[in-house]
Every structure is written in C-alpha cells, then in structure tokens.
Amino acid sequence: MLTISAQQLAELLSGIARAQAAIINGIESANPGTRSSHIVPALHNVAHVLDHPNPTLTDLPVRVVLAYMGRVTPDMPALQRDLERLFSESEPVAESAGTLDFSVPPTVAT
C-alpha cells in the first residue's frame, strides 16, 4: 500500500496549483480582465474563504491556487500543518457509508 507524507502531499498540491495558476494566467493574457472579473470571484466562492477561517480538505486545494495567483507563494510548512490537522481530525468512514474504491463492484444484499 502506498503511504504519502504531509510534505509529499503538500508538494503535490503545490505543483497542481502552479499548473492551474499558469492556465489562468494564459487565459488572462488572451482575454484581459477575465481573471479579476470571472475567475477570482468564482475561486473565492469555491474556497469558502469567508465561511471557513480554517480550510477544509475541499477548500485547501483552491486556496493554494489562489495563493499562487497572488504575489506571495503558499507557505509550505503551513500547508503541511493544515494537511496534518485535517487528516488527524478525519473520522473513519462507517461500514454502511460504503467505500470510494470504484474498482470493486458494490455488493448487493439479497
């Protein structure tokens, strides 16, 4: 089984966010104003910046993208701490909730 550290996951999220920020910068170059009028407001909405002062697992990747779009790059140690906090708070999935492994067909009760 593959195990990944918080540092490795932070670096992976950072690399993906850098690629997304580069795409957004390319769109901005082709259509000036798109970034500030359409993309950034949509990202702020998805990141729940105002709703959740501490990011959730869903919000964190979007916040990393927003950080790369700003003047200051994300703080990697802070990102690692957020990941460690989020994974230590997560509760195990109940048996009745199922699994996210879609490679195994679900069992049907008869």
Image (tube, grey):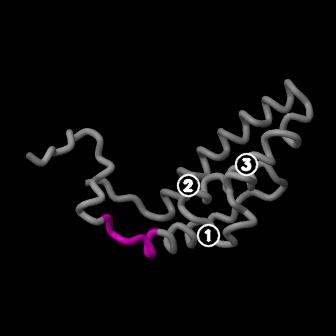
Residue type at numbered disc 1: Pro
Q: The residue tagged with tag 2: helix, strand or loop?
A: helix
> Any magenta on residue 92?
yes
**Residue reaching furthest to the left:** 110
- Quadrant of residue 5 within the rendered picture: bottom left
Residue toward you, 53 or 7: 53
Q: Is residue 11 left or right of residue 47?
A: left
Mark 3 lies on residue: 43
**Residue reaching furthest to the top:** 30
Mark 1 lies on residue: 77
Q: Relative to 14, is 50 above or below? A: below
Bin the neighbour count of mark 3 within 10 Å (Cα to Cα): few under 14, some 14-19, many 20 and up.
some
Q: The residue tagged with tag 3: helix, strand or loop?
A: helix
Residue toward you, 39 or 45: 45
Query: Marks 1 and 2, how far apart in space?
Result: 10 Å
The image position of residue 86, as x and y in percent, is: 50, 70
User: Which residue is located at x 75 percent, y 66 percent?
Assistant: 50
Query: Marks 1 and 3, how far apart in space?
Result: 23 Å
Residue toward you, 27 or 90: 90
Q: Relative to 89, is 24 above or below? A: above
Q: Relative to 86, is 71 above or below? A: above
User: Which residue is located at x 45 percent, y 69 percent?
Assistant: 87
Q: Which residues are magenta?
A: 87-93
User: Which residue is located at x 87 percent, y 26 percent?
Assistant: 31
Question: Quarter holding the N terminus?
Answer: bottom left
> Any magenta on residue 59?
no
The image position of residue 51, as x and y in percent, is: 70, 67
Residue type at numbered disc 3: Leu
